[in-house]
Image (tube, rainbow, N blue to C red):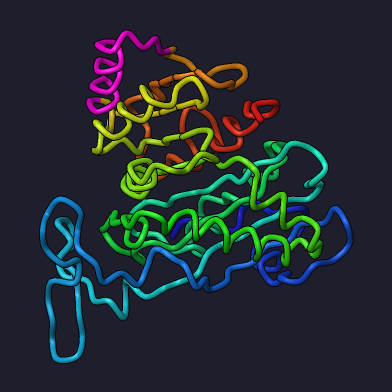
Amino acid sequence: MREITRRTVLGAPLVAAMAQTAPSAAGAAHMQIIAFETSPFPYAGDIPGQNKPFLDVASGARRGHTSPRGGVYWEDETYSDRRVLLYVPPGFDPKRPAAILMFLHGNKSLLMRDVVMRQQIPQQVAASGLNAVLVAPQFAADALDSSAGRFWDPGVFPQFLDEAAERLAALAGDPGTRHLFHACPVVLAAYSGGYMPASAILQARGNDRLKGVLLFDALYGEIDTFADWIARQRAQTFFFSAYSVSTKAQNLDLENRLAEKSIAVHQQLPQHFAPGEIAFLAAGDSLVHNDFMSQAWTRDPLSAVAARLRGAF
């Protein structure tokens, strides 16, 4: 069994850090997993482009969804978790330019077990030095399913951000930060199956606060959506995709599509991100996809990329 407590957050074990859900001294970290009113799931609408309901099977009173990879998953077990991970890192300064970094997890994931304990995403955000807070919603719970749920519906993502702003201000213990969290730019960081929620957010449009997309071995599909968004928004946004052999073909496809649109790309991690930056990184064919958020071309790749976002806002 993999050791999942090998590192610490702010000098304390991660489990203990998660227990701190109330504000404390200024400059301290605040972390919380809390149910939202506006969340990706539960979802009872249709699957976009398929003309069929998401919940397409029933057994008595139970309803379920047929996942192409995982088979039937039941709503009460897999698609009912409204919780969202919120994290305000130590030293976060609302008086400086700030951002919301939104992490979209992959398949077979749970917020505590995988995002916090195994991948240690909060610690990576803190270690980057980026003046940003972390927001990570739960999608399909511990399932082979990349569904975006309510993020497929136009208008839901902005509502989600509004609720996140209120809850972040409460978590930070400073009501005066509400206006900051309601207005600050947003960066999407998607791993693996997180590509589908990312695509849904991009297709919804009207998200003027979205300033960048970071993909971590995540480009399994929706290539047209990413290509169109880059072409439409590249003057005001940035895009980065790092990949292993798992998504190599799709990344090369996207690069070719951008070339056909005469959009220049870089094939390395930029020293600093700025609007208009479009970059791809071949992280290595021998990497293990399931470990990509912990060990890719470098250890803690989200931290390495987020560190280069400083000054981008």
Is residue 250 part of the magenta span, yes or no?
yes
Q: Position of residue 166 (x, y in %)?
A: 66, 64
Q: Is residue 77 left or right of residue 155?
A: left
Vertical placement of residue 168 versus 220, above or below? below
Quadrant assignment for the N terminus: bottom left
Q: Nearer the viewer, residue 15 or 67?
A: 67
Q: Quadrant of the C terminus?
A: top right
Q: Where does the magenta region start and end? A: 249-265
Residue 3 visible at all: no
**Identity of the residue furthest to the right in this view:** 25
Q: Quadrant of the rendered structure where residue 12 is?
A: bottom right
- Give the residue at x 14% y 91%: 60
| Left or right: where 22 falls relative to 206 | right
Residue 42 visible in image: yes
Dominant secondary structure of the residues highlighted in magenta in the image: helix
- Whether the magenta-drawn stretch holds residue 313 is answered as no
Residue visible at 32% across and 61% down? 149
Return the residue found at the far bottom.
60
Up-down relation of residue 209 to residue 229 (above or below): below
